[in-house]
Every structure is written in C-alpha cells, then in structure tokens.
Image (cartoon, rainbow, N blue to C red):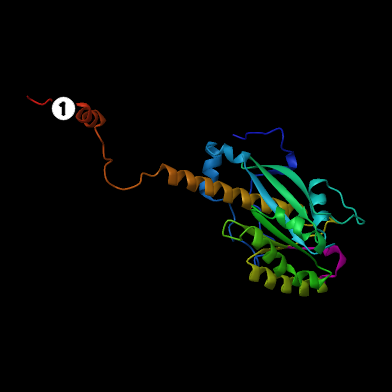
Amino acid sequence: MHRSHPQVNRDRIIQGYPEAYTKQARIDDKLNFDPRVRQACDSGCLMNVGLKICKMIIIGDVAVGKTSIVNRFCKKTFDRDYKATIGVDFEVERFEILDTPYTLQMWDTAGQERFQCIAAAYYRGAHIVTVVFDLTDIKSLGNAKKWIQSAGKETPISSNTHVFLVGTKKDLISESEYASIKREAIKVANDLKAEYWSVSSKTNENIKEFFFRVAALSFEGTMLRELERRQVSSNQIGDGAPIKIKADSHNSAQAKPTNRCCKT
C-alpha cells in the first residue's frame, strides 16, 4: 500500500530504479533496486532511514554551471547571468523513494581558488561527490581529477561514496563536437571510477534524471548499510552455549562468616 508523505512533492516520488546515462561509464549495471531494499521498504521496518540526510557536494571550476544545475532542479529556473558562488550555498530536496521519505542535501561550492579554503571545509562527510565540467571548455574536464583529489583530502573516497562526472551546457555544442568530447569524458570518468552524465540547465535536458539517479543510488546504499548494521548487531558472538554464572552461590561464599576467634 502506498504511504503518502505530504511534505514530498509529487515530482519527487521515485518508484522505479533510475537508469544510468550511458553503459560505458556507470556505477552499476542493475535494472532494479536490491530485493532486500524493496522488502525492507514494503515492510516499513526501516522507516527511520527517512530521518537520515544524504550529503552531496558539487565541485568543479568556476563558471562551469554548478549553481545552474542545482537551481534548475530545485527552483525550476535558469539564469544565464548569475553571480559566482561565494564560499558555499546549499539546497535541500525531499524525496519519496519506494514509499520511504529521503532527504538530499546539495552543497554547491565555489570554484574560485580564493574560496577553496572555505569550500573544502564543507566536503567532509559527503556521500555523493559530483564533479562538474563545461562541455565547451575541455580544460575544465582536465581539471576533474584535481577536484576529486581535493575532495578526497577532506572526505576519503570509499566504496560507500558515489562519484559522478557531469558535463554541462550541452545545448551550446553540436552533435559532432559532443561525440568527441563524450569519448574523452567517458575515459576520465572510468579513470575516476565515476558515472558520467551530460546535461543542459537551459533546456532542462537530463537534469531531473540525473538527480533522481543520485537520490536513488544514495538511498539504496543507506538502506543496505542499515540492514547490514542491524544484521551484525543481532548476531550472537561465538558458537557455543552462553556461560552462566550463579551470582547467588558466589556471593554467599563471599558473605559466609569465618570463625577467627582464638582460644585462650
């Protein structure tokens, strides 16, 4: 039975497993949520996961379009003449995934060098690392590795961290130009063990699909870790029968008075 949550907008409900943008650079090749996750959601036994927040950091060179993709998804707006982000900014989006509430917190960081010491402090504890580059500026793609290394200093990239490489401004290049850049971007993504996407904030191409993919993968990872944690905590340590200590007999032995009187 569908459990509706009033605080979640209709266009933030995810029931199916969002597909990757390309088979050539993706985090997984699955077509559906893990059966254990579906079962847990159907039973409602992990509803407390809805209280958890997924932290997503968005990094990359200045003026590559980091703020634009966030604004297009969260506010449904596009501004060609935006002001560069100073330090960091963030947005919060609430989803309902498999009838379970889930929150994605997006930290939009400044790309300017002078703000790096400020922005880097907000990298810590990130579950999603998204490196953004400009499809019309190949140099910004070349800097992707540097940004991943910078993020790794503050929040170690592990198997629990999903990394995305996102090319923006797809509307500004021709199909032939894009085909060449895409090949190079896929090589970089595979080298970084990242999933590749291309989007356009102006036309809204792939924006919703990208963020749905981010939210779904993060949600599934959170659920699986919670299931594993509960499994470990419920297991008995050791195979033998538990040792029982009879506290009453032990204590009575200690409490029994001894006759230390001396005969004269």
Give the residue at x 54% y 39%: 46
Placement of 255 over or under 164, stated as above or below: above
Using the image, determine if residue 45 lies above or below residue 64: above
Q: Position of residue 245 (x, y in %)?
A: 25, 35
Where residue 170 appears, as percent x and y from the top left, is: 82, 64
Does any portion of residue 234 appear in the rendered image? yes
Q: Mark 1 Cα within 10 Å, few/some/many (few <14, many 20+)?
A: few
What segment carries the magenta color?
Answer: 166-175
- Marker count (numbered): 1
In terms of depth relative to the viewer, which is nearer, 68 or 27?
A: 68
Look at the image and tell me whether residue 99 can be seen: no
Q: Which residue is drawn at 67% across and 34% down?
A: 5
What residue type is disc 1 on?
Answer: Thr
In the rendered image, the quadrant that contains the C terminus is top left
Residue at 72% across / 57% down in the picture? 120
Quick one: which residue is furthest to the front in this view? 264
Query: In which image quadrant can residue 92 be found?
Result: top right
Image location (x, y in percent) of residue 21: 70, 61
Based on the picture, tell me whether residue 170 belongs to the magenta stretch.
yes
Residue carrying label 1: 258
Tell me if residue 241 is in the magenta stretch. no
For this rendering, which residue is in front, 129 or 223?
A: 129
Q: SS for tag 1?
A: loop
Rendered position, 161 above or below 176: above
Across and down, in percent, residue 260 comes to 14, 27
* 236 horizontally vs 103: left or right: left
Q: Nearer the viewer, residue 157 or 176?
A: 157
Q: Is residue 39 left or right of residue 70?
A: left
